[in-house]
Image: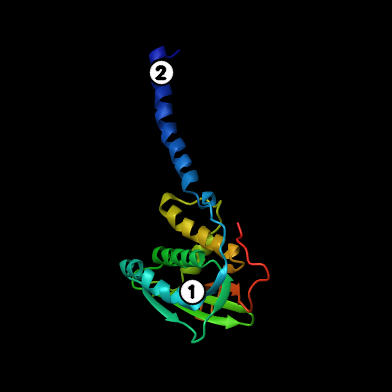
């Protein structure tokens, strides 16, 4: 039996109303994708990572309190000088805190340990909680920091922090990765060369 033209039009409109939200959602996902973020040229200068971590404890206090997460920092007495873009490094730390606030259960502790190892400045981030047997921060970062990995809508914002924090670390000539931590268990580690002397030709890096 051949459907009437009216039925055909109704079916066509129905398919259109079903497909249109999917197209819009995909377009919005592309717009919001971390891969589409455009960075400004780097302005490298001598930066004390210890000072940035101290600032982080104040700038992220409201977010940590809202997530019911305590921050426990172990900072060295001496400065941790590196050559980098201070604003981008601040954003990287903010993304790590944002990721921790979503990955960790309420009532947990975000531990940070700053130190030098040879010619490198090293920051370790570790989460601990009585509500979780295994640390979650590093595993969540590893799972979401691949830009092309498919995630559901609830994790899209968290993935942005994971991807952008890794991209910033790469741009700073550093490394951000999951690895066994001196704080115990699997943690998040950031490594960056220490600033022994000024670069021969300081310049902005796109």
Q: Describe residue 190's horizontal placement relative to residue 158 as left or right.
A: right
- Give coordinates of residue 44: x percent, y percent: 57, 67
Q: Position of residue 196 (x, y in %)?
A: 63, 79
State which quarter of the image contains the C terminus: bottom right
Q: Which mark is residue 9?
A: 2
Pick the residue in front: 200 or 30: 200
Residue at x 51% of width, y 85% of height: 78
Above/below status of 101 relative to 157: below
Task: Name the residue carrying label 1.
Answer: 125
Q: Quadrant of the N terminus?
A: top left
Q: Are marks 1 and 2 in contact (CB under 8 Å)?
A: no
Sort mark 1 into few (<14), some (14-19) or many (20+) by Cα contacts within 10 Å.
many
Q: Is residue 27 above or below residue 54?
A: above
Residue 75 numbered mark, or none: none
Q: Position of residue 54 (x, y in %)?
A: 42, 77
Q: Residue at x 59, y 73 (%)?
A: 192
Q: Is residue 12 above or below residue 55?
A: above
Residue 4 shows up from this direction: no
What is the secondary structure assignment of the residue under circle 1? Answer: strand
Q: Nearer the viewer, residue 8 or 45?
A: 45
In this rendering, position of residue 46 left or right of residue 108 = right
Name which residue lies at 46% across and 36% down: 23
């Amino acid at each position: 039996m051949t459907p009437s033209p009216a039925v055909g039009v109704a079916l066509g409109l129905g398919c259109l109303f079903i497909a249109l939200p999917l197209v819009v959602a995909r377009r919005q996902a592309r717009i919001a994708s971390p891969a589409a973020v455009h960075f400004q040229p780097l302005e490298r200068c001598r930066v004390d990572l210890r000072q940035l971590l101290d600032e982080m404890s104040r700038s992220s206090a409201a977010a940590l309190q809202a997530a019911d997460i305590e921050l426990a920092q172990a900072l060295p007495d001496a400065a941790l000088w590196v050559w980098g873009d201070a604003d981008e490094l601040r954003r990287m730390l903010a993304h790590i805190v944002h990721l921790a606030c979503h990955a960790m259960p309420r009532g947990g502790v975000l531990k940070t340990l700053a130190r030098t190892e040879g010619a490198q400045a090293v920051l370790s981030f570790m989460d601990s909680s009585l509500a979780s047997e295994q640390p979650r921060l590093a595993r969540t970062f590893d799972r979401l920091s691949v830009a092309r990995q498919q995630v559901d809508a609830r994790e899209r914002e968290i993935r942005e922090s994971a991807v952008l924090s890794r991209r910033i670390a790469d741009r700073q000539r550093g490394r951000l990765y999951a690895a066994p931590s001196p704080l115990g268990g699997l943690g998040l580690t950031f490594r960056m060369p220490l600033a022994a002397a000024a670069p021969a030709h300081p310049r902005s890096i796109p």
